[in-house]
Amino acid sequence: MDELRTRLADGALDRQLLALYGPVRLEQQKRRYAYMLDRFADTFQRPADAFFSAPGRTELGGNHTDHQHGRVLAAGVDLDDLAAAARTDTGRFRVLSEGYPLLDVDLSDLTARPGEQNTSLALLRGVAARFEQLGCDFAGAGADVYVVSDVPGGSGLSSSAAFEVLLGTILNDLFSAGLDAVQIAQVGQYAENVFFGKPCGLMDQTASSVGGVVAIDFADPADPIVERIDLDLWQEGYALCILDSGASHRDLTAEYAAITDELKAVSRFFGKEVLRDVDPAAFYAAIPRLRTLTGDRAVLRAMHFFDENERARAQARALKAGNFSRFLTLAYASGRSSAQYLQNVVPTGQTADQALMLAIALSEHILNGRGAVRVHGGGFGGTAQAFVPLDTLNEFKTRVDAVLGEGACRVLTVRPVGGAKIA
């Protein structure tokens, strides 16, 4: 029996696994880890050296503020991308995600390839390329990785960021690169922006890499201010629910890009690259001219940014002060602003199919003035987020599942650990 399997079987890893998954899921996760060791050995014909994990994330506040260098509030959750990995002398970075073809990158050729855009191979090559740019010398070495995931794709829990952080955490450890959690997040963002071709901000990767509840200020994206905040939702009497609307996130890159493009058009009117650098008073005074130059939707989206940026700061302050009711009021306002001003709930031109808006409306009806519900993450497809009083959780889940489908309402917990090596 190889060393890693022995340590898993005799309980030597239990303390780390409990921190990630809690006592209820411990034995289930140990079976998952053992299964992954088998699959790694079958795939690469050798034992793995270590386990690595990166969580999905949930956005608690700051919808579409990060790419404008704004403030966000986010948290890692108890669903993760999990890998068994080993360093090799092949000069290749090989990654097999269960259910997908093997990805194989030559670490001596890490230039971006336009034909790989919007693929996982682009993320793999991009993460490795950024490590090389930061001084990591692969020198003929490589890595083999087997990945399993329970972060649903297109769920709004940011499976892509979890994958990027997982790859970064692996390379950081196997090649002793010495990056901290925020730097690993920045590597993931670079891969997604430059190689994958999606103009995302840095919130998703930071929340996954750091873990716990984090308030992040991206005024300086090269050196974001990250503050951990204690939050026990169950102690507050609420559950965090993610509601799968059934509407896919796929093929919506143009919708997300339109948000950044329109906000950029507003900021450039003032000679700035991002709205964080624009004076809100100057913006409101210039609305008559902006309507002509950028269009009304761009103006409304900018209004959302200015309000949401302050709202994210207020949410963080409410949590630090122990004022959860104030946090809920702000979360509800965030959802309203996203739907009405940012307009990232219904894809452009869709009329008959409005699954995400339906999920939000249904949740508001069931909650009947209690808790809060809001669009979650990028929007347009994917999920809504609801804070549900524990005394109504079973009823809420039953009624949501009856409309959206069995299992559509998923109850999550906040994971206190970000990207991590488990060994």
Image (cartoon, grey):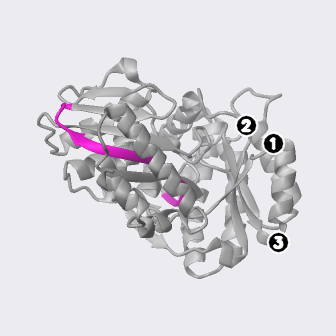
Identify the secondary structure beneath mark 3. Answer: helix
* Residue contact between numbered discs 2 and 1, judged by CB atoms under 8 Å: yes
Q: Is residue 273 visible?
A: no
In the image, residue 82 sits, relative to residue 233, either above or below, namely: above
Q: Quadrant of the C terminus?
A: bottom left
**N-terminal of the two: label 2 or label 3?**
2
Residue name at image x 55 percent, y 67 percent:
22
Q: Earlier in the sequence, mark 1 or mark 3?
A: 3
Q: Residue furthest front?
A: 1
Given residues 423 and 386, the one toward you in this image is 423
Residue ID for mark 1: 404
Instruction: Work out how far the residue at label 2 is from the one at label 1, CA to CA, in angstroms.
Output: 7 Å
Give how far across and how far down residue 145 sits, in percent: 35, 39
Q: Which residues are magenta?
A: 71-91
User: Taking 61 as reference, is 190 above or below it?
Assistant: above
**Residue 80 part of the magenta-drawn span:** yes
Residue type pointed to by label 3? Asp
Res 414 quadrant in image: bottom right
Q: Do the numbered discs 1 and 3 sit on residues whose CB atoms are within 8 Å?
A: no
